[in-house]
Amino acid sequence: MAMYLKGERAEEASALARAAELLGQARLPVIGGLLTDIAGAEAALALARKLGAVIDHDAGEALTRSTRLARETGACPASFGEARNRADLVVLIGDAPLARDPKLINELFPAEEGLPRPGDKPRELVMLGSARPRTVGDMPVTTIPLKGDDLPTVIARLAMAVAGRPVGGEGKLDGKIMRLAELLRGAAFPVFVYSAADLEEPVIHVILDMVRHLCLTTRAATLTLATSGNGDGVNLCSAWTCGLPVRTRFIDGLPEHDPWLYAAARLIDSGEADALLYVDALEAEGATPPPGVRTVLLTRDQGRRAAAEIVIEVASAARDHDAELYLPRLSGIGVVKAAQAGSGAPTVAATLARIADLVPLAEAGPC
Amino acid sequence: MLIRLKGGRVIDPAHDRDAVGDVFIDDGRIVAAPGNGCAPDETYDVSGKVVMAGAVDVHSHIAGSNVTMARLLMPELPALAAKKGAAIAPTPAAWSAFATGIRYAEMGYTTVIEPAVIPTHAIEAQRELSRIPIIDVGGLVILGNDDFTLGLLHDRAGPSEVEDYVAWTLAHSKCLGIKLINAGGSAAFKFNARTFGLDDEVPAYGVTSRAILQGLQRAVTALGVPHPIHVHCNNLGIAGNADTAVATMEAAEGLPMHLAHIQFYGYGAEGPKGLTSAAPRLAEAIKRHPNISVDIGQVLFGQTLTLSADILRQFDGRGAASPRKWEIIQGEGNGTGIVPYKYRAKNFVNAMQWSIGLEIMLLAEDLWRVLFSTDHPNGALFVRYPEIIHLLMDKDERARMLDRVPPEARELSNLPGIAREFTLSEIAIVTRAGPARRLGLADRGHLGAGAVADVAVYTDRADKTAMFGSADLVFKDGRLVVKDGEVVDISFGQAFQVAPDFDAAIERKLAHFYDRYYGVNSSSFGVPATIAARPDRFQTVPCLS
């Protein structure tokens, strides 16, 4: 596996030294992308701490929305397995869940009967603000179209109906919304499925409050779609490593979190960031670093030699080596075995560790 | 390299030792005093100081997806606790895996057990444990609310199949023992039950908590797992639940069992406030059942966070969250409930809880079976252990604290009538020798020849909080890791597991079960031996034959 400086093939030692130098001399380096496994995430965090860098993931927006809401208001999540086996009412919110995970409905509603579950009604699927999907065959599905309103408004109306709050001003709520509210209150375990990447924070907050209200009389939960690029895995790793989620900066070894301030894309756009180490090393998906900043690119692709000032080809997690990754069906970190025998390519973890070794301590951290 | 710790007061209750003398370390082990002509390579003069084996924590929530979700829910916990004087840095990083090991080592702890490993999330638990420096660790894996266990019992599976499943689970999660948390309670909660007692039935499966408890206990015992089944009983926190604790002890029917955080079951329901101390009753029951051990789950006043896979109980208690936020995670098996909580000296119930935990310890006859814990973080953060040691050793300190509580609690507390003050040997039993023995870790918790050279040296002080808050010297596997209360060497320890055999048929059955009901490949949550990226990370503790 090769390393390149300004598009030209370079000696390993030289490329790594230049990467360490670029990052070590930066006033505000950012480690981003982070499409990598848990081992890669750990190494990225260690390097960030040494550099005094910001750490962010491409899915940072979705991740920090969820963690901020949890931190400020709490949460009520269900695992995928519980939603699949025990939810008697599943409400998919908007188009995003199915667009991001086309097998979602088939896996939440498998053909075979699941584990024993509460309630005596047949399981139901509701598409809130979305059309009836083609994949469900003749399974009964209720669709609640937007009818000219936007999705946040429809969600808010549903929340009001569930809470039994009087509606002022515009008159009666849509009949379908009222019926869904009834269904939710009568369900043994309703679960709302949504993508945090596709809903604004206040909208997610309304859903969470609705779930908490339902918990007064029944039991309800949310199922947030796993983010792309092992975002959930990287975020958990950040939390156990430094106590905080991604979009965190290390200052004198201590972490400081701010989902707006420490967003990689914003820092690069504004010019505050003056160096970027971007990791793109997962088999299932690829990503491109944002332009406009001196970049060290760790990529599992070959043939991107000119994609950044310093390009380091690395192994692809779960293709070239076993990898620990967040597995959506497990709602947790599992291990994925390597698809093919070791290619000999250096792992992200090993590469980042070597760069960290080369960063001089005197230069580590901001002035 | 031969190391001599010279002239300290050596406290080693496992060998009836409390005397001034030397401790010798060689090649990572305690050795007998060498013969003449064998000069030590290093000598530490510890005269006037107290020398004990490194402490062993039998029950502390330090790693796993549940702990990390708690970190995300309340990153401000260390700062809030520090503000009120807890010995913790006021930063979210104080709650990281790395800081956990550092802080434990600074207090002289060298082995800690994580008591709630979720089977399908064992990889995260073991990964996090591997990031905790210095201390040796072990996990207890949770069974009893998972559908596979319930299915086996419902189908009246034979004992050998239950044993196979238990053994498979231990191997798959690389854990040291089995944990039961309100057996059947989480499963019943999924059917919207809100209470669950020992003889209640799980809907659809028709299995009682008692049947789950006994079925799994028998399997653990038959397999020869050294640590007994570790049980979080039903009805935690409910007035009158001393009945449940005693009934659970009786349900053990003479087989070994460990009851977790027993303070939370020390409640009678009498009196003007409907809450009294049942500590004397529990102490008596523990005495009467030599097969039973407990850990205390002591409460301290201050800010903490409750983290428990007793989701039925956590859901019930969510209204008391302080700060007002909570997380109920509906997962496979038990799930997890996270509820921030502040114990207040002026709150009658909290004051009773504080008193009851201490009473149970102080009334204990056989301290080898009444072990020290706060069920960190549930009763108090582990960094506050020294405060509890102080309370056990100093009745005036107890009296001072009793002055702060409501008069109704003072009247009902049994503490005023208890003059007992723990000796250093007794502290060593409940924080080292007893836990090590109960866990089946024969090479630690004591300073006999052949023991692992995990040693803690403290300056003897009247202020026991200060004394045990910061060790002068700590050796881990014979290496100096702490000097003057600060870590001087970062090493990484081992993880203990047991590995009883099982019939491969169970593996096929489970592969099918997880594929059918979860769409998951069961090997995807098996902990690989390479999880720690260090060779020899796992040490297998032999099963009893």
Image (spheres, coloured by chain):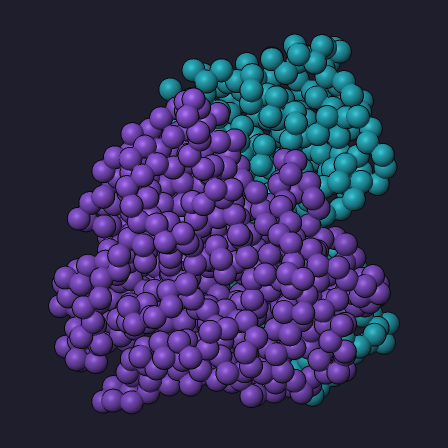
**Residue A156 at least partly seen:** no
Q: Residue at x 19, y 49 (%)?
A: B463
Q: How many marks?
A: 0
Give the left or right position of residue B114, taking residue B387 as reference: right
Picture coordinates of residue A362 (x, y %)? Answer: 43, 15
Outermost residue to the front: B36
In the image, residue B504 lies at what x, y percent?
A: 83, 61
For the residue pair A275 and B455, the one nearer the viewer reads as B455
Which colour represents chain B? purple
Residue at the location (52% across, 31% down)? B27
Residue B381, position as x, y percentages in the image: 36, 55
Q: Residue at x 50, y 37 (%)?
A: B29
Give the left or right position of residue B38, taking residue A107 as reference: left
Q: Residue at x 69, y 40 (%)?
A: B530
When asked about the image quadrant of residue B121, the answer is bottom right
Which chain gets the cyan colouring? A
**Residue closer to the observer: B425 or B358:** B425
Q: Quadrant of the C terminus of chain B?
A: bottom right
Q: Quadrant of residue B213?
A: bottom right
Work out whether residue B50 or residue A85 is closer to the camera in this orientation and state it. B50
- How far from the left and from the top, in percent, is residue A320? 79, 34
Q: Would you place residue B122 above or below residue A179 in this image?
A: above
Between residues B450 and A177, which one lies in front from this camera angle?
B450
**Vertical position of residue A216 compared to residue B509: above or below:** below
With B317 as the anchor, is A337 left or right in this view? right
